[in-house]
Amino acid sequence: MSGATHDVPTAAGYVNGEISYWYREIGLPARRAPLPGPRDYDVAIVGGGYTGLWTAYYLKTAQPDLRIAVLEREFAGFGASGRNGGWLSAEFAGSRERHAAARGRQAMIDLQHAMFAAVDEVIDFTRAEGVDADVHKGGLLHVATNPAQDRRLRAELEDLRTWGFAEKDMRLLDPAEREERVRVAGALSAGYSPHCARIQPAKLALGLARVVAGLGVDVFEDTTVTEILPRGHDGRAAAVTDRGTVTAEFVIRATEGFTASIKGQRRQWLPMNSSMIVTEPLPDAVWREIGWDGYELLGDEAHAYCYAQRTADGRIAIGGRGVPYRYGSRTDARGVTQPQTVAALHTILATLFPAAAEAKVHHSWCGVLGVPRDWCSTVDLDHRTGLGWAGGYVGSGVTTTNLAGRTLRDLVLRRDTGLTALPWVGRRVRRWEPEPLRWIGVHAIYTLFRAADRAEKAGPPRTSAYARLAGLISGR
């Protein structure tokens, strides 16, 4: 997402960074106490985001006598869990063919159906545990705005039929229903799936952390894990922190985009950057022009795609890739976003919704997500070493983290279930290339994707060769 900057209208009190708008809306949480020194547990979980918290929740509810610790460098929900676009969707990262190659085509279909169910699992949790996360299950719209995107969308819908998607799971909208739902300028077609809900991600993260701590899980914040060690002679795995070493029968790595900060993990998952802006509340007259009364989640079919939601308080939050990667797998902690990225996101907003072109930007921020070398999510637990992990969600983690938490529960408890048989369990992925190849490759990929999007705006109704070249480089 690049190009010439323009003067972006900003609201009084505009903020850039400071983690995310979602926390600005509700306030930052009071910090929990750090690890008080060396401790021993049954399960130690490194990372207090959705993955770590869901894993702790399902383990503790399945076996209440387990001694579980969550170790978090900042506060629970600080990372992508409190910064994402709020898509509780059934979309799963990675190639279906690649997952099917592991355990067969039916296994991938089972995985997709597990994702459908996971959307409702999270919604049921919020209701049962009294977590108010602005949940609204309005479904998901993917809109095509040029002939190449339209052709791609229709081909994708046809392919989905072979992967367990019935008409009720994903369908092409007729023009009248498309316009009735959301009026996107220049829309040629739109696919709709009911398997998606809008959430306020920080509210979900803080609510989940509250529930987990209430169950008796020790959530230690301001505690930096520097190294994770397999079982030694004492039979205990370990998480080495700046406040003492935690030993446990199992240590689960749930660090997603921050995995490179762990010793020996720098090339494991690439920390991909994603950025967002949110507008001031839009007046009723603008909403009458746009529609969007169903609060569907909205994405486009561009290669450098965007994602958006209508918030509970009447704003548009919209995101995209921004500057995709920082050299050496560096991450930005506070979420400050480059002016050119803010301008690019505002341009996308104005292009999709001309009625909102003059809407002022209230807040901009960014965060990182984890990307494996083959762009496919994975979860596993090695009973020999005592080490487990989940992640590499490539931006589709809000729902996938829940599936990961339940799967890790079954793996820790040695349960042979339908979840442990899914094809993303136990996958091994090669590491990313060393620098500077990593930086050059990622920036080349997104330069090509953006070139492809520009070419497709006025080009023939087929996917640009730039995008096909990007796909070859990326290995997706």
Image: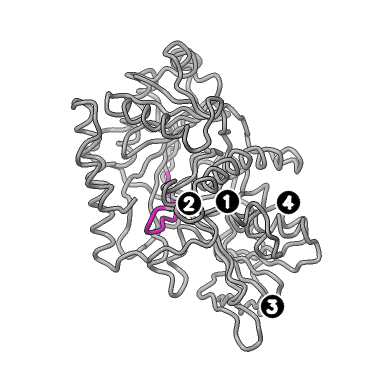
Q: Which residues are magenta?
A: 365-375
| 43 to 155, vertically: above or below | below
Q: Earlier in the sequence, mark 2 or mark 4?
A: 4
Label 4 sits on what residue type? Val
Label 3 sits on what residue type? Arg
Label 2 sits on what residue type? Tyr
Q: Earlier in the sequence, mark 3 or mark 1?
A: 3
* Residue 48 sits in quarter: bottom right
Q: Which residue is mark 4?
A: 211
Depth-wise, is mark 3 or mark 1 nearer the camera? 1
Q: Is residue 310 visible?
A: no
Q: Earlier in the sequence, mark 1 or mark 2?
A: 2
| 90 to 190, vertically: above or below | below
Rendered image: mark on residue 393: 2
Rendered image: mark on residue 39: 3
Please state the horizontal and vertical placement of residue 271, each as a whole percent of the image.
40, 57
Q: How crowded is the residue under tag 4: few (<14 C-alpha within 10 Å), some, or many (20+)?
A: some
Q: Is residue 454 left or right of residue 386?
A: left
**What's the CA distance linking mark 3 and mark 4?**
22 Å
Please state the horizontal and vertical placement of residue 353, each as a whole percent of the image.
38, 22
Q: How crowded is the residue under tag 2: few (<14 C-alpha within 10 Å), some, or many (20+)?
A: many
Residue in the picture at 70% in, 40% down:
126
